Amino acid sequence: MSEPLRGFDPRPHPPSDDPWLVPLATRRAILSPGPFERYGRHVLLFLLTAASVYVMGGPHLVLGLLAILLAHEMGHYVACRLYGVDATLPYFLPAPVVSFVGTLGAFIRIRGPIPHRRALFDIGVAGPLAGFAVCLPVLVLGTLQARVIPDPGPDAAGFIYFGDPLLVQWAYAWLRSDPGPGKTFLMGPLAEAAWFGLFVTALNLMPVGQLDGGHVSYALLRRRATFVSRIAVVACFFLLYLRPTWLFWCLLLLVLGRPHPPTLDDDRPVGLARALVGAFALLVFAISFTPSPIIVSWSDFREGLSQLLTSR
């Protein structure tokens, strides 16, 4: 039993046109967001992202890439709903010109507390595994779609060379024959979608702070996850020393790399089955990751930056 608020008159009041003078339950009903406020931003961002991806790569890139990203985020969202954790629908991030595929990905906001480490593990791992499952057929179709062209060489203008993760290398080895000397494969839009989807999956599975891999690491290791997170951040800065393409990601990890907060019931065990799923997620990371996503050296980066600054 709680004490009444000072100055509060418990007697009923007549109806008022001012929503702040009516009871709390009625005020919530009056001020609760409508369908557009609840879904409008998500739909609008999704449509803008689809348009941005279409401009950068066409309809096949839209279908392949947005299917992967949507599966990833809905994996998180559905897991949140199963555990009664308050979370938003996905926010997609359109990025025409800035990103070669027209988007920087998507995310959901988890607004409620996580009840225990089992829920944290399931919510964290559901997204990458769902996205990875959709990546596989997109990769197969993209590999079959890729064209054989004369190798333009590393200095050719207008070509971007990507570092292929193990899974992409295996796909070309299993599904395509060697293009021959002086020739190479030119990725089509579906192959680009699969490559970007695998790259996003690997980045999210890094065992750092608030990333998906950070959730999984904390759920399995608890306090020791902080040490693992620091090792992963150091490894990313070593990658930055090798390739300038890691600059933005290293800066982002400085924000996301803070220690993981505990769940409401950290003492509840995770169980062997989830530990095995965690080992599988580590395997997915290993075959989806590439240390050189875009093959560019620091000297090339400095030269390009210098030309950009002098051209203004």
Image (spheres, grey):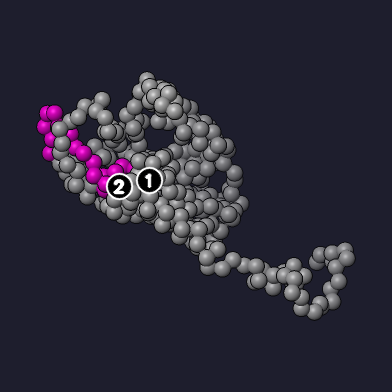
Question: In the picture shown, does residue 45 fall above or below 235?
Answer: below
Mark 1 or 2, nearer chain start = 2
Q: Is residue 180 magenta?
A: yes
Pointers 1 and 2 in contact (C-beta within 8 Å):
yes
Instruction: Inspect this view and state whether residue 136 appears.
Output: no
The x, y position of residue 182, in whole percent, is 13, 28
User: On the picture, is 223 further left or further right than 189?
Assistant: right
User: On the picture, is 298 further left or further right than 251?
Assistant: left
Name the residue located 17 percent from the left edge and 42 percent from the top edge: 147
Q: Disc 1 on helix, strand or loop?
A: loop
Report the residue that reaches farthest toward the top.
299
> Which residue was labeled with disc 2?
57
Name the residue located 18 percent from the left edge and 30 percent from the top edge: 151
- How crowded is the residue under tag 2: few (<14 C-alpha within 10 Å), some, or many (20+)? some
Q: Disc 2 on helix, strand or loop?
A: helix
The x, y position of residue 92, in whole percent, is 45, 52
Alpha carbon separation for disc pair 1 and 2: 8 Å
Question: In the picture shown, does residue 293 fall above or below 23?
Answer: above
Range shown magenta = 177-198
> Which residue was labeled with disc 1?
102
The x, y position of residue 54, in whole percent, is 33, 51
Report the residue that reaches farthest toward the right.
7
Question: In the picture shown, does residue 308 fall above or below 218?
Answer: above
Residue 28 is tagged as none
The amino acid beneath tag 1 is Gly
- How many numbered markers are drawn? 2
Report the residue that reaches farthest toward the front.
312
Q: Is residue 11 magenta?
A: no
Assign the C terminus to one quadrant of the image.
top left
Q: Which of the two residues, 211 or 187, is positioned nearer the viewer here? A: 187
Tell me the quarter of the picture where residue 170 sits: top left
- How crowded is the residue under tag 1: few (<14 C-alpha within 10 Å), some, or many (20+)? many
